[in-house]
Amino acid sequence: MYQTFIEPFTFPFMARALAELIMLGALAGTVGVLILLRRLAFMTDALTHTVFPGVVIGYLLTGEGGIFWGALAAGGLTAVLLTLLTRNRAVTEDTALAVLLTTFFAIGVVLVSRESGYTTDLTAFLFGRILTVTAQQLTQTLVVTLLVVAALVILRRPLTARAFDPQGAQAAGYRIGLLDLITNAIVALVVVASVRAVGTVLVIALLIVPAAAARAVSDRLTVIVPVAALLGALGGWAGLAISYDASLHHGLRLASGGTVVLVLVGLYLGALAAAAAGRRLRTVRRTA
Amino acid sequence: MGMTPALDLDEVGVAYGAAPALENIDGTVAPGEAVALIGPNGAGKSTLIKAILGLVPLASGRITVLGSAPAGARRHVAYVPQADTLDPEFPISVGQVVLMGRYRRIGWLRRPGAADRQAARQALEQVGLADRARHRFGTLSGGQRQRVLLARAIAAEPRLLLLDEPFNGVDAVSEQALLAAIAALKEGGAAVVVSTHDLALAHLACEEVCLLNRRQYGFGPTQTTLTPERLRATYGGHALELRGDRVIVAHS
C-alpha cells in the first residue's frame, strides 16, 4: 500500500501532480453538485469543447503559459454565449448548443493540424499532461479554487433557490440571469483550471462523476457536497498512484488522466451498490 | 374603506411582442380578502400573476402593490408555484424548502436564527405537515408538496399571497388543508390572489373573482360576478354546465 499510494509522491514532479489533482478533484466534485442540481451536464460538456480552441490559440501565441489564458478567454466567451442562449429560450436550445460546441472544437482541431507535431500536441490538449505541472500552475489552480469556493459559499442560498424553483426565486427578487451567468462562469473557470492537467475530454468526468456518486449515497446537500469533494480528491490520488505503479512496476503504460477517470467511475459504481444495499437493508428492517 | 388596497390594478395591459396577452384589467383587492382569477388555459392568468410580481413589463396601465410599484413590494409578497413544475429528485428536505421562505430575511451568510426556525415550523404546522419536516420534498404526494410550498410562502409572512393553480391534481385532504391555511392568512390581514379552474373553490375561498380571457369579463364580489352568462362569455365556445350551486366547466 505504502509503496503504491505514498512513495511515488516523494518525487517533486509527482508531489506537484498529486497536489494539482487533489485540488482539482475536490473543486470539480464540489462544482459538480451545482451542475447536477441545475442539470447542466450537457452544457458543461459543450464548455469543455469550446474551451479547446482557446487552449490551442493560447499555446500557439505564447507557448505552454498561454494555455490558461487562452482557455479562460474562450471559457468566458462561452459562458456569456450560453447564458444568452438559454435565457432567450430558443426553440432548439440543444441544437444550438451542439452546433456551438462542434464549431469551436473544429476550429481547435484545424488550428492544431497546421502545426508540425500534430498528434503529440493534440493528445496533450485532449488528455492533458498532469506529470509536467509547474509551481505556477499550482498557484493558478489554488487561486481558482479559493475564488470558486468563496463564490459558492456566499451565493449558496440564491443558487439553491434558483436551482430548486426558478420562478419562485425570481418572484423573491433574485436576479436569475445574473445567477446563471455566475454559474456558467464558475463551471468555465473549473474547466479552464483542469484543462492542462486532465485535458478537455476527461474534465467532464471530474465534474460529473463524483457528484453523481455522492448524490447516490445521500439526499442531503450538506452531505453530498463534502462527499463529492472527497471522492474527487480520492479519485485523483488513487488514479495517479495506480497509473504510476502500473507503469513502473508492471510494465503497463497507463495514461494518468484516463486512470483517474476509471477510478472515479469505479467509485461511482461502488456508491450505486452501497445505495442499493442500504435501501435493501432498510426494507428488510422495516418488514422484520 | 379608506384603507390602502393590497393590490390595485389600473387598466393593466401586457403584451408579448406585438401580440397583446392582457388588456384593460381593472380592480382592487383589500387586505384580508381573496380574489380568484378565473379563465380558460392561455387566458393570461399566469401572465397577470407575473405582472403583479413585477416580472413582465406592462404595455399600459399601472399595478400598485401595498402602495408601491411591484418590484418595490417583493419583500411583502409571496408566490406559490405549481408543485408539479418542480424537480422531484432535488435533494432537499421539506424543512429546508419551508426555510427558503425566510432566505430574504436571513440574508446571504447568516445562519437561520431561532425566529426563522420557529416561523418555518409554525408554517409547516399550519398546513398539517409538521411531522414531515425531515422527509425529502420529492417523496411527498403532489397535494402534500403543494402544501409545503404554501408553508414556504407563509413562513415569509407575506401581506400579499399569489397562488398559481394550487388545487390542480390535489387530493381532498390537501385541498382542505390548503383552504384552511389560506383562510388563516386572510384572517391575519393578508390579501390573496389565486388562479384556478375550480369555480366551487372560488366560491369557498374568495370574496371576489376576476373573470379573464385576454381581457376582463368581470371583476367583483363572487356571488354577483360568477354568473353563468359571464362564464359563458369568458370561456367562449367551451361547454358549461350548472349543477345546483356548482358550476362545471368542461374543456373541449
Image (tube, rainbow, N blue to C red):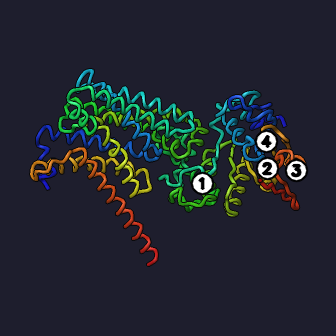
Q: Which residue is mark 3?
A: B223
Q: Amino acid at mark 1?
A: Val
Sequence-first tag of 1 and 3: 1
Above or below for A123 versus B175: above
> Residue at 49% across / 52% down in the picture?
B90
Q: Amino acid at mark 4?
A: Asn
Is residue A220 shown left or right of residue A19?
A: right
- Pick the front one: B114 or B40: B40
Above or below for B117 versus A101: below
Q: Which residue is mark 1?
A: B148
Report whether residue B34 is seen: no
Label 4 to label 1: alpha-carbon separation: 30 Å
Residues marked 3 and 2 touching at CB (< 8 Å): no
Q: Which x, y percent locates residue A187?
A: 39, 37
Secondary structure state at the residue bearing disc 2: loop
Is residue B196 shown left or right of residue A249?
A: right
Callout 1: few (<14), some (14-19), or many (20+) C-alpha neighbours within 10 Å?
A: many
Question: Could you confirm whether marks 1 and 2 are on the same chain?
Answer: yes
Is residue B100 shown left or right of residue B21?
A: left
Q: Which residue is mark 4?
A: B213
> Residue at 16% across / 51% down in the picture?
A5
Residues marked 1 and 3 touching at CB (< 8 Å): no
Q: Amino acid at mark 2?
A: Cys
Secondary structure state at the residue bearing disc 1: helix
